[in-house]
Image (cartoon, rainbow, N blue to C red):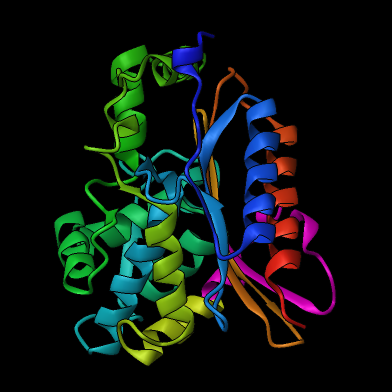
Amino acid sequence: MSAAAVHHPVYAGDDAALLGVAEAIAADWAALGVRGSFLARNLGTGEELGFDIEESTPLASVAKVPLALVVLDRIAAGELDPALPVTVDPGTSSVGPTGLAAFRHPATVAVGDLLLLMLSVSDNAAADALLDLVPPAQVDARLRAWGCAGIRVRHRMNHLYECAAGAAGNDFSLALELAVRDEGAGRHTIETLDPARANAGSAAALVGLLHRVWCDEIAAPRATAELRRLMGLQVFTQRLASDLRADTLRWSGKTGTFLHLRHEIGVVEAESGDRVAMAALTRAGRRAGLAADIDLAIGVAAREAFEALRCG
């Protein structure tokens, strides 16, 4: 790699020690061939650390969090019934390995339970069923009305796979190869990997959203309380939460994975009263469907950031 191609992160930190933690995390990721952005913020003190926090990145399933908030706000306003039954037919629904997306037969599920499936097991079919009720343009408009300009919701979850198939046929390995190649070249053969056309957001915007959700400063309090509850039920713990497992800690999060993207956002809450919101958005520079070392590096980043920011 030429010197001109070397990426120099833009760091954020409230003092020299926090900047040092941010620099160490960025160096660890770079050593693995990972580009990305990271931000952690203590919700009580406002202190934070991170790097490249304003960089817009395709969100994959992390987009399900702002979607859930908008749907829950509609429910709180009486505009949508959480008991409304929705029938999902696997023959016409979205691709995915979990939940209704993996079903072989039609199923009828209430709106409230679609939210549970979407956030707990990242069910793409559940997410797109909700987007049929509250379309992407409406979600995006509500986010802008709330002042969440750094987060965009533009398409259904299945559009991720449609665009990958359009570029690589049914060869997912080729799609991954294209994603990695294009990352290095700064172009986007797969439309939903282009931040200008994808569901996209920055670490700063996502942590800002979590901050407002955890402090009841956005949407209806009933909506934010339910979103916190549902995010606490996520079953995937291999990333940010992996090094934060303890009886004295509670993690609430949402992962996002697609091709070379491995993300997670969430909040860790300690018995001491500390609450730290985090966003890790990564793009791998190698073709790997499984990358435990990258997941581990995200977990190490979370632990180091939490220890640096906690007061108790």
Residue extending farthest to the top is: 2
Query: On the rendered structure, is 128 left or right of 50?
Result: left
- Residue 123, image x, y percentages: 48, 53
Q: Is residue 45 above or below residue 251?
A: below
Query: Quick one: quadrant of the N terminus?
Result: top right
Residue extending farthest to the front is: 16
Examine the structure image and report whether residue 235 is included in the region drawn in magenta.
yes
Examine the structure image and report whether residue 116 is included in the region drawn in magenta.
no
| Residue under the image location 49 percent in, 81 percent down | 214
How many marks can you see? 0
Residue 236 appears in the rendering: no
- Residue 285, image x, y percentages: 56, 21
Q: Is residue 277 above or below residue 226?
A: above
| Residue under the image location 30 percent in, 41 percent down | 92
- Residue 243, image x, y percentages: 79, 56
In the image, 152 versus 9, the foreground residue is 9
- Residue 177, image x, y percentages: 49, 13
Q: Is residue 71 above or below residue 221?
A: above
Q: Is residue 110 above or below residue 282?
A: below
In the image, 174 versus 248, the foreground residue is 248
Query: Quick one: quadrant of the C terminus?
Result: bottom right
- Where, by quadrant of the figure, is residue 64 drawn? bottom left
In the image, 69 versus 170, the foreground residue is 69
| Residue under the image location 70 percent in, 36 percent down | 28
Residue 28 appears in the rendering: yes
User: Which region shows up in magenta?
Assistant: 230-255
